[in-house]
Structure formats: C-alpha cells, structure tokens
Amino acid sequence: MQQRRIGRNGPLVSALGLGCMGMSEFYGPTDEAQSLETLKAALDSGVNFLDTADMYGKGHNERLVGRAVAGRRDEVVLATKFGFKRNESDPRLGREIDSSPEHCRRAIDASLQRLGVDHVDLYYLHRRNPDVPIEETVGAMGELVREGKVGHLGLSEVTAETLRRAHAVHPIAALQTEYSLWTREVEDEVLPVARELGITLVAYSPIGRGFLTGTITRPEDLDPTDFRHSHPRFQGEHLARNVGMVERVRELANRYGCSPVQLALAWLLAQGEDIVPIPGTRRTKYLSENVAAADLKLTDEQLAAVSAAVPRTSVSGERYDPAGMATVGF
C-alpha cells in the first residue's frame, strides 16, 4: 500500500490505517477471534497504522491490539490515546475528561503495560479539559517523548487556536478528528492551520460511522446496544434526510465501478497527502474493501461530482448527542 508521513518528521504509515475501537465495544456484539483475524489480515495487507485508546473497552482494546502485534512490533506504527475516564454511571463512554499532567503520566504507563510494548509511536490527547492549560498537558506529553515512552505527539478534536498553542510547546505530528464526506467542518479553520504547521490530519469515522455504506436506512438496522442510536444523524427526520444523501453516493459509485465505501475513502484520500483515514472494521471482507480504495484514483471531474452530491448543508443533525458535542472543540 502507498504510504504517507505523520507530521514533518514522523513515521511513514499506510495511506489507510485501521481504527480498532469497534473491536471492543460501541457497535454491537464483538468477537475477539474475528477481530484478531482482521488485525492480522490488516498487517499482512500492508496496513501498518493501528489506532486504539485506553478507554475503548476499558482497556480491552489495547490488550487486544497488543496480542495482535506481539512478535510483529517492528511492522506496526502504534497509536493510542488518553484523556477520557470511564464512568460507571455511563458505562458506554463516560464523560469525565482528565488532561492533567499527572493523569498523562499514569495513563501512558498503564497503556504500555496493556499493549505489552515499551513505547508507542504516536500518543494522542483524546479530549481536552479546557480547565487545564494545553501548555501543561503537552509539556507533560513532551517529557514522555524525552523518556522514550512515546515517539510523537497528537491531539484530537481541538480548535485551531489550541493546535497552535500546543505546537509552540512541543511539535505536534498528528491531529485526529472526524472527517468524511458528511463531516467537513474541519476544512474551515483547523485543517488550514494543521497544514501550515506540518501536522497530518488523521481522519476517524471516514465512512460516516458506517452510514456511507448505504446499509443503514432505519434504526432497526443497528443492534439495540449500538451507541449510534444516541446520535442525531441516525434518528428520525435526520436519518430520513441523510438516507437520500447516501443514495446519491451509491449512484455515483455504481457509475464509477466501485462501492460507496470505496468512493467515500477515495474522495477523502484525494483531499491531500497529509490526510490519513483510519476506517474501523471487525471483519476481513470489509477490510479488503477498504484497502482496495487506496488504489482508486478519481479524476477532478469525479471528485467534483462527489462533493456536489453531498453538499455540507445536506447533512442533517449533529454528529454526537449533546454530551458528546460538549467534549469537542476546545
């Protein structure tokens, strides 16, 4: 697979990474054996960029990824995150965010133990508590680089101003944020600043949390435990409007001889060499579909047609529920 660089001086990674969150929770029942098979297939196919976090499955996801990379550590660019604290009163996600230097130091040691490695290549602040100056958090993260526990630093879902302030303390190699055909707000301010500073944008949910597959047309298409039930875009009138948008993507995909997923990923890859999407999947057949998108080259005319099919104003509903939206944009 083609490769792209993380930051100005960071590691080369596969043009498409693999988001591992759904292997532990959030999207219905999980199958550990199936997930391990998918992780192995990803590495075998040249996908070397694995994304996890300490809060996914309350540590289960890091342990799972650690099992998958055992004996293959040199083949992998490993990324994890800290910041969320799980909350027993909200077992799916939890809303407490701790971006203090003290928590940063505790969290990396716990993550390294679960992963079974002596360092991670990329360490993100998952979410920021605005009560903690970003300079303090990034200062502590920078100490982890000097100690050899972390290779490069990243932030997630922050503002352009926060990105500048953080980068002034220690080089930030990656910004992880939601970016896809149906989530494009990052293009306004954050992406231009990231490009100015030489920061790679790692795009999570590049298939719109699965919506751009075209397989979700009603709430009953999701498992009852799926956390997307709480997302406005998957509810009521918002869902009905968004289904029409996906139909336009499907029509173009049929015309271009690919799947809607491949079209969405190819469109995102074409937005710049500094964009690295990390679609998540638990199944090898979907992994193969995603990987094939890296070889799909769209013409300027086709890219324009895709963008026109999904104008930013056509997407209905917020991307998170109110509690989730309260954790982004600081």
Image (cartoon, helix red, strand yellow):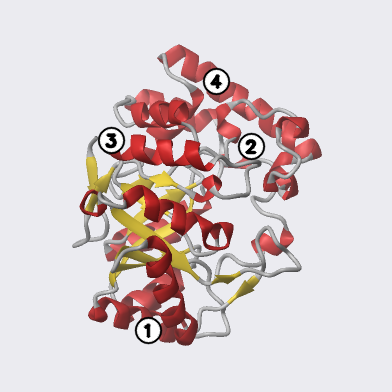
The residue wearing badge 3 is 44
Local secondary structure at mark 3: helix
- Sequence-wise first label, 3 or 2: 3
- In this rendering, position of residue 15 left or right of residue 183: left
What is the distance, in whole Å, between disc 2 and disc 4 at their CAs?
16 Å
Looking at the image, the residue that sits furthest to the right is 236
* Residue in view at x 21 percent, y 53 percent: 74
The residue wearing badge 2 is 314
In the displayed structure, 40 sits above or below 326; it is above
Q: What is the three-letter code of the residue carrying label 4?
A: Arg
* Mark 3 or 4: the one toward you: 3
Local secondary structure at mark 2: helix
What is the distance, in whole Å, between disc 2 and disc 1 at their CAs?
41 Å
The residue wearing badge 4 is 250
Q: Position of residue 206 (x, y in %)?
A: 48, 42
Q: Which mark is residue 174?
A: none
Q: What is the three-letter code of the residue carrying label 3?
A: Asp
- In this rendering, position of residue 74 left or right of residue 220: left
What is the distance, in whole Å, between disc 3 and disc 1 at their CAs?
35 Å
What is the distance, in whole Å, between disc 4 and disc 1 at their CAs?
46 Å
- Sequence-wise first label, 2 or 4: 4
